[in-house]
Amino acid sequence: MSRDSLYKPRLFIDGVEALQLVSAKYNTTTNNNVSTLSAKINAPDLQESSLYGKKIEFFLNNGSEDGSPLFVGYIRQVQPTESNISINAYDVRTFLTESSKNLNLTDEYNYDGHNLSQFLKSYVEDYINVNETYINVNKFNSTNPPVSLTGLRGDFKPYDILTSNLSKAIDITDIQEPLDYSMSVIEDSIVFLKKKKLDSTPSLVLSKNNGLIDYKYNQRPKKFNANYMNRRLTYGSSPNGVFTIDYEGEDEYPAEQRHMAYIQLVNELQNTQEISVTSSMGHYVGLENIVFLNVEDSNIAGAHRVVSKSITCNKSSISLNLGLNKGLPVLSDYLSQ
């Protein structure tokens, strides 16, 4: 898209606009990695030391002036050259991922009685927002079902507590479509995003006549078998092969292990396609939202969840790439052995 009145990206460093913005690239995914912004500024006189650790806000302003920034983060890398300065910034989760302090959870010091949201709020207030508010705790949300940290003992990095336990939050109201969670950010706050059902109203419909520029996809091997407690569970008529998952849960009884292994297997089957879409629409569509592809290729036509987003812009153009996934197994195909 050529640059005209349609968009005007703006970058602010500690509240001051960087008027010499040359280019920027924004990346975000649902795999619990921090979102990033890399930018190039035509301001060689700026000192590297004066930029590191500064708060930045990026407004895409695509079509109209944004009311809130697309990205809020902190500069963690600075690379000056004779003509420009390149910076890399990470979202507010950087304060959790960078922490070198392990939490030693014991019978005396622990987070018994806390769910993930309560743990996150307590940790941020005790260890991060000590002298200044870096992470907004007022927008934290809980998972459904909640995940309790009662009984958790040992040495852990704070972010690992979140990511490892978030995988246990699975809404199985509809066993045919279990909905798990990923972690993301909205401005300066951390949120837990639950997958939307594939039959939800799409946030975006793309076709060759409506925003879709190009697409490509890879088909990963489907995993039809799950091993648990020296048993095997098979999904499908009688698929064979090496494409098997090994479920190692904490459940005490075989029936519980089998149930959780099935949920994991269904989740695996939902994520066998990796679709990359280049589009002129959807710059503000959120992760885990539904995008409907109205294309002739029956392999990917239909509803998909947004699993990644990348936006690149410079003085003359802007481009958008969306990562999508597809797939929903049919429960009637489920057999046990």
Image: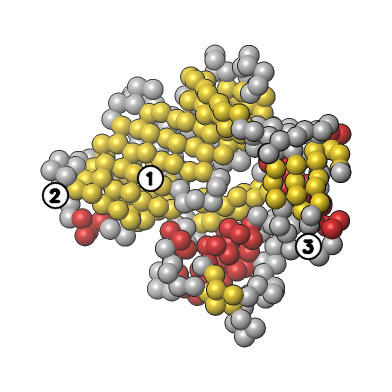
Query: Residue 172 at what x, y percent from top left?
Result: 78, 49
From this viewpoint, which residue is outermost toward the bottom? Answer: 108
Name which residue type carries label 3: Asp
Q: Is residue 122 visible?
A: yes
Query: Residue 259 at what x, y percent from top left?
Result: 82, 51
Quarter of the image with the N terminus is top left
User: Which residue does the numbered mark 2 point to in the structure image?
Assistant: 45
User: Which residue does the numbered mark 1 point to in the structure image?
Assistant: 37
Q: Is residue 291 visible?
A: no
Quick check: 18 left or right of 176?
A: left
Name which residue type carries label 2: Asp
Q: CA distance from mark 3 to mark 1?
A: 41 Å
Q: CA distance from mark 2 to mark 1?
A: 21 Å
Asked if disc 3 and disc 1 are in contact, CB closer than 8 Å, the reply is no
Quick check: 296 left or right of 83?
A: right
Residue sitting nearer the eye, 199 or 156 = 156
Rendered image: mark on residue 251: 3
Mark in front: 2 vs 1: 1
